[in-house]
């Protein structure tokens, strides 16, 4: 698959567009924490080429600090990311049905985008969402202390296997 077309939107994020020959729908895909959009071309079962082959125009944006978007690597302002997601959705053409895919942390961002504006969405796929059961009070307190002491410190992110992608066999 060739390089995507650049997709410039009114947000400070890198955007990409992979065009299908005869599109029947369009999809906004956004990667998870510590990832980037173009990885879905060669990895993750080559999801983008498969979607394009099935007739989906695929649009994608890189989170702040990820992929080709400027920012401190790995730091995400979720409120700003929801704003960027809404800006990306608004920049998509209105002529085709629109689907959303939000993976991991972006499950929260995609969900926040939908809560704020439900227009022009056929469906949303939230995979391996970061919306988990609440953490313990002690862990939340420790996280707040560490965020004040060392806000730019790396945080090890556990990487579950493929079984975490979906519980639907």
Image: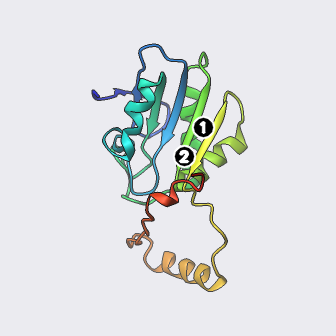
Q: Position of residue 56 (x, y in %)?
A: 49, 25
Image depth: mark 2 or mark 1 in front: 2
**Which of the pair 76/138 is nearer the observer?**
138
Q: Is residue 148 left or right of residue 154?
A: right
In the picture as drawn, the residue positioned furthest to the top comes out as 22
- Work out whether residue 92 can be spotted: no
Identity of the residue drawn at 48% across and 21% down: 55
Q: From what the image shows, is residue 101 above or below residue 137?
A: above
Q: From what the image shows, is residue 55 above or below residue 144?
A: above
Q: Which mark is residue 102?
A: 2
Q: What is the spatial separation of the Cα atoms under label 2 and label 1, in whole angstroms?
A: 13 Å
Q: Is residue 20 left or right of residue 132?
A: left
Q: Position of residue 23 (x, y in %)?
A: 49, 17
Q: From what the image shows, is residue 60 above or below residue 18?
A: below
Mark 1 packing: few (<14 Cα in 10 Å), some, or many (20+)?
some
Q: From what the image shows, is residue 83 above or below residue 120?
A: below
Q: Which mark is residue 32?
A: none
Q: Position of residue 102 (x, y in %)?
A: 54, 46
Q: Position of residue 124 (x, y in %)?
A: 63, 40
In the picture as drawn, the residue positioned furthest to the front comes out as 169
Residue identifier under label 1: 86
**Which of the pair 155/123 is nearer the observer?**
123
Q: Is residue 116 left or right of residue 40?
A: right
Quadrant of residue 74 within the rendered picture:
bottom left
Mark 2 packing: few (<14 Cα in 10 Å), some, or many (20+)?
many
Helix, strand or loop for disc 1:
helix
Do the residues under discs 2 and 1 have CB atoms within 8 angstroms? no
Q: Quadrant of the N terminus?
A: top left
Identity of the residue drawn at 27% across and 27% down: 2
**Which of the pair 168/53 is nearer the observer?**
168
């Amino acid at each position: 698959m060739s390089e995507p077309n650049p997709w410039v939107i009114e947000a400070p994020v890198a955007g990409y567009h992979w065009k299908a020959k005869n599109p029947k729908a369009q999809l906004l895909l956004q990667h998870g924490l510590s990832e980037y959009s173009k990885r879905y071309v060669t990895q993750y079962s080559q999801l983008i080429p498969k979607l394009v082959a099935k007739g989906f125009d695929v649009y994608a944006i890189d989170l702040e600090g990820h992929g080709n978007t400027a920012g401190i690597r790995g730091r995400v302002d979720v409120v700003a990311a929801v704003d960027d997601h809404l800006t990306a959705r608004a920049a998509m053409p209105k002529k085709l049905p629109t689907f959303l895919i939000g993976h991991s942390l972006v499950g929260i961002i995609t969900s926040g985008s939908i809560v704020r504006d439900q227009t022009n969405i056929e469906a949303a796929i939230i995979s391996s969402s970061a919306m988990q059961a609440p953490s313990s009070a002690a862990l939340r307190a420790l996280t707040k202390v560490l965020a004040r002491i060392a806000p730019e410190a790396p945080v090890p992110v556990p990487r579950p296997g493929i079984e975490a992608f979906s519980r639907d066999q």
